[in-house]
Image (cartoon, grey):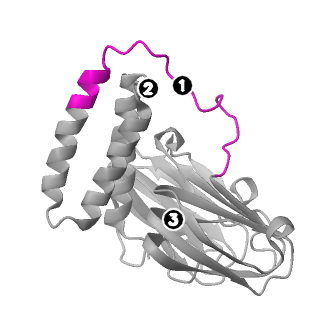
Amino acid sequence: MLRRVTLIMVFGFLLTFFSASALAQDCDAAALSSDLADFSAQMQSSTSASAVLDEVTVWLAASQGACANSTQPIQVASEPGAPKEPVLAFSSAQDGNQPVLGPVTIPDGVYRIRLVTDGFFSAELEELEGTCDLSTTFGFFNIMMDAASGGAEVLFVSSGCEALITTSNVTKAWTLDFYQLGPDDVKPVKAEYSSEIDGSMPLLGPLQFEDGRYKITLVTDGFMSASIETVNGDCEISGFMGLFNIMADQASDGAQALLTTKECIGLITMSNVTEDWTLTFELIK
């Protein structure tokens, strides 16, 4: 199960690092990245998180100072709007219909893992080394017929992760892609999302919320579970069962949840989606 502290730690480091590196204008980015990985490893093994964070604070100040006068050009990974390339990509076409993938080494970071298939598909991820955190407790994927035709996604955090991925109950061709998330992926929350536009079971975000209170309305005729994972700040749901945990027909006329936000950046994960849906966000302050 994805640990909130792991997500905040890994993504928080990324947010800080990317902010600093933009100022640094790519002054020895490889060395800075190596330092960041070292801090992540220290945090995993340290008995004092505050001591490591103190080191990070000193390092950031020194790095920003060293890079402030750099004249090297800023390197842009891709043009605005260009599709992001997966860090890892698997498919039935190249790996076989029902393979055991791995051992797979997944670089440290936060990932959107996207499965596309028209059929049934189940997968389990077995951690061999490091930390491999998933946003779901129901296995890696457990997909019914057509449930991932528009794409099904899960949130994943790797810290030195090496794993085996075992597939089963595969009935159609499939693709499985790992997309690494960073600060450039953070977008302001929109007023509405839907399965028609965003896919049947997407990972929404990272989403940036204004400070205040949001009334979130779900409309669907089927089952649906959804939760919010905090990346930064406070993203607090009024209930204790996650954002939504809906049975068939319970949200045909709409089901609502209250989200209280302060400097909130969050990711909304979904599972057990069986019908089309819409999700709207209304800021009520």
Q: Is residue 119 above or below residue 111?
A: below
Discs 2/3, front: 2
Q: Position of residue 200 (x, y in %)?
A: 71, 65
Asked if labels 1 and 2 touch by Cβ distance under 8 angstroms, the answer is yes
Residue hosting label 2: 26
Can residue 224 be seen here? The reply is no
Can residue 112 be seen here? The reply is yes
The disc labelled 2 sits on which kind of residue?
Answer: Asp
Residue hosting label 1: 75
Mark 2–mark 1 distance (CA, rounded to whole Å):
7 Å
Which span of residues is magenta-colored? 62-86
- First along the sequence among labels 2 and 3: 2
Q: Position of residue 147 (x, y in %)?
A: 75, 74
Mark 2–mark 3 distance (CA, rounded to whole Å):
27 Å
- First along the sequence among labels 1 and 3: 1
Q: Position of residue 24 (x, y in %)?
A: 37, 24
User: Dot 3 lies on which element?
Assistant: strand
- First along the sequence among labels 2 and 1: 2
The disc labelled 3 sits on which kind of residue?
Answer: Phe
User: 99 and 81: which one is in front?
Assistant: 99
Q: Is residue 90 above or below residue 61?
A: below
Q: Is residue 3 magenta?
A: no
Residue hosting label 3: 156
